[in-house]
Image: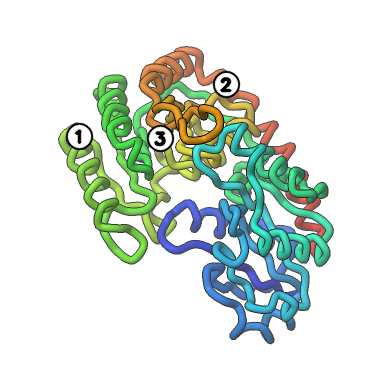
C-alpha cells in the first residue's frame, strides 16, 4: 500500500510536529509506504503518482477555512482528475477570534463545499481535531465527522502513561504570541513568569522563528526581535524553534509550558507535562473546549461605536487583548502549582479515549 501524504510544514514548528506524528501513527497502524508532497502546491504535475496510490491523506493542520479549496489546498485544477480517495486526518477549523458567533455564521465558499463533497463521496468519514471543527462540518451538512484529535496529540511513547504531577518545576518554556494585538500582553506575561519563577531556567521559544524571510514579514520580524530583546533583559534563553523538530527536542527535559503556541501546549501535554495555554484564536479554544481544560482567553470584545447609515443602529465591535488575562493566568498557575496540577491528573484518560477513535479511523483507511 502506498499513500500520498500532504504536509503544510513550511516554517512553523507546530506544522512539522503534526506531520511527524501523523507519519508515525500511519506507520504504527501499518498504513504504508509514503510519498510526501507539499500541500500548498498544485498536484497536477504528480497526478499519475497520486492515481497509482491508495489515497491522498491530508495530515492535520488548521486548514478548514472558508477558502479551503483552492486557497489552502490547491490540489488539482480539475478535481475530477483525482481518482483515489482524499482523506482528512485530524484537520481543524481556524478563525479569529473563533467564538460561538463565529461558529454559527461560518460558511465555506462554493468551491470549498464542492471539494468537501468530493472528499465525502471518496471516503465516508472525516477526522476532526476538536469538537468546534466537528460543529463546522455538521453545520455544512457533513455528519460523519469523527473526533479523533490532531495527530500531534499522540506521542506513541506516552499514550498509555499518566501525567507527571510533580511539583518540581526547574525549566519553563514560554511561547510568544503570533498576532500583533498580543504584543504588550506577551511582554507582561514574560515579566510575570520571571516574578513567579525567579530562580528557574526560563526559555522563550519562537515556533515560527524571529527573523525575516519568505514566511515572516519585516514587520513581524521587528516585533519578534523586540520580544527577544526583552527576553534577554529578563534572563530568558532565546530559542529559534522554526524549521526543524530537533529545535524543540529539549522540551522533553523541561517541566512546564506557558504561552500562546497551541502545538507547544499540545507537545507538553503529549509528553504528560503540564502546560497553560492562552487562546489567540479558534485553534486554542477548540482544543481547550474539547479536552475540558480551562485555557485563558487572550482577547476580549469591545464596542467602538454605532453604524448609523443603515436602517437601524448596529453596534460595531473590535477585538483587543484582554486586560484580565494576565491576572487570570497568574492565579491559575499559582493554584495548579499549589494543588499538584490537579486539573491534569486524569487528562491522559481523555487522550486515551480519543486515541481509540483515531486508531479506528486509521484502520478504516483503504
Location of residue 201 by image quarter: top left
Question: What residue is rendered at 64% in x and 52% in y?
Answer: 91
Residue 23 in view (yes/no): no
In the image, taking residue 307 as reference, residue 118 lies left or right, namely: right
For marks 1 and 2, the one nearer the N-term is: 1
In the image, taking residue 114 as reference, residue 245 lies left or right, namely: left
Q: Could you tell me which secondary element the residue under label 2 belongs to?
A: helix
Q: Residues within 10 Å of mark 2 (few under 14, many from 20)?
A: some
In the image, taking residue 244 as reference, residue 237 lies left or right, namely: left
For marks 3 and 1, the one nearer the N-term is: 1
Question: What residue is rendered at 49% in x and 30% in y?
Answer: 274
Query: Whole-percent x and y of residue 291?
Result: 63, 32
Q: Quadrant of the N terminus?
A: bottom right
Q: Residues within 10 Å of mark 1 (few under 14, many from 20)?
A: some
In the image, taking residue 92 as reference, residue 354 lies left or right, namely: right
- The residue pinned by badge 2 equals 343
Nearest to viewer (mark 3 / mark 1): 3
Residue 49 in view (yes/no): yes
Residue sitting nearer the eye, 330 or 302: 302
Which of the labelled discs sits on residue 235, or is there none? Answer: 1
Amino acid at each position: 500500500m502506498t499513500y500520498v501524504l500532504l504536509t503544510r510544514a513550511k516554517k512553523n514548528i507546530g506544522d512539522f510536529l503534526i506531520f511527524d506524528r501523523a507519519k508515525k501513527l500511519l506507520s504504527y497502524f501499518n498504513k504504508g509506504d509514503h510519498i510526501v508532497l507539499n500541500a500548498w502546491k498544485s498536484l497536477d504535475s504528480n497526478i499519475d503518482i497520486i492515481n497509482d496510490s491508495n489515497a491522498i491523506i491530508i495530515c492535520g493542520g488548521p486548514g478548514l477555512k472558508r477558502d479551503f479549496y483552492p486557497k489552502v489546498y490547491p490540489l488539482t485544477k480539475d478535481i475530477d482528475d483525482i481518482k483515489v480517495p482524499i482523506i482528512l486526518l485530524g484537520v481543524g477549523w481556524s478563525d479569529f477570534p473563533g467564538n460561538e458567533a463565529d461558529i454559527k455564521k461560518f460558511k465555506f465558499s462554493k468551491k470549498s463545499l464542492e471539494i468537501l463533497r468530493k472528499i465525502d463521496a471518496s471516503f465516508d468519514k472525516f477526522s476532526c481535531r476538536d469538537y468546534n471543527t466537528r460543529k463546522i462540518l455538521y453545520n455544512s451538512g457533513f455528519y460523519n465527522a469523527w473526533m479523533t484529535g490532531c495527530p500531534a496529540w499522540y506521542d506513541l511513547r506516552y499514550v498509555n502513561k499518566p501525567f507527571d504531577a510533580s511539583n518540581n518545576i526547574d525549566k519553563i518554556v514560554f511561547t510568544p504570541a503570533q498576532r500583533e494585538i498580543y504584543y504588550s500582553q506577551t511582554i507582561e506575561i514574560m515579566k510575570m513568569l520571571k516574578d513567579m519563577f525567579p530562580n528557574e531556567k526560563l526559555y522563550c521559544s519562537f515556533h515560527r522563528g524571529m527573523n525575516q524571510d519568505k514566511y515572516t514579514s519585516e514587520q513581524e520580524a521587528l516585533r519578534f526581535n523586540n520580544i527577544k530583546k526583552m527576553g534577554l533583559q529578563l534572563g530568558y534563553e532565546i530559542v529559534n524553534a522554526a524549521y526543524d523538530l530537533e529545535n524543540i527536542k529539549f522540551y522533553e527535559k523541561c517541566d512546564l509550558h506557558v504561552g500562546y503556541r497551541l502545538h507547544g501546549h499540545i507537545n507538553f501535554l503529549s509528553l504528560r507535562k503540564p502546560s497553560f495555554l492562552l487562546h489567540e484564536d479558534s485553534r486554542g479554544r477548540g482544543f481547550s473546549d474539547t479536552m475540558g481544560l480551562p485555557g485563558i482567553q487572550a482577547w476580549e470584545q469591545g464596542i467602538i461605536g454605532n453604524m448609523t447609515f443603515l436602517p437601524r443602529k448596529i453596534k460595531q465591535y473590535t477585538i483587543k487583548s484582554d486586560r484580565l488575562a494576565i491576572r487570570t493566568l497568574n492565579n491559575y498557575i499559582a493554584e495548579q502549582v499549589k494543588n499538584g496540577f490537579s486539573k491534569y491528573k486524569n487528562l491522559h484518560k481523555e487522550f486515551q479515549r480519543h486515541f481509540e477513535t483515531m486508531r479506528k479511523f486509521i484502520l478504516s483507511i483503504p
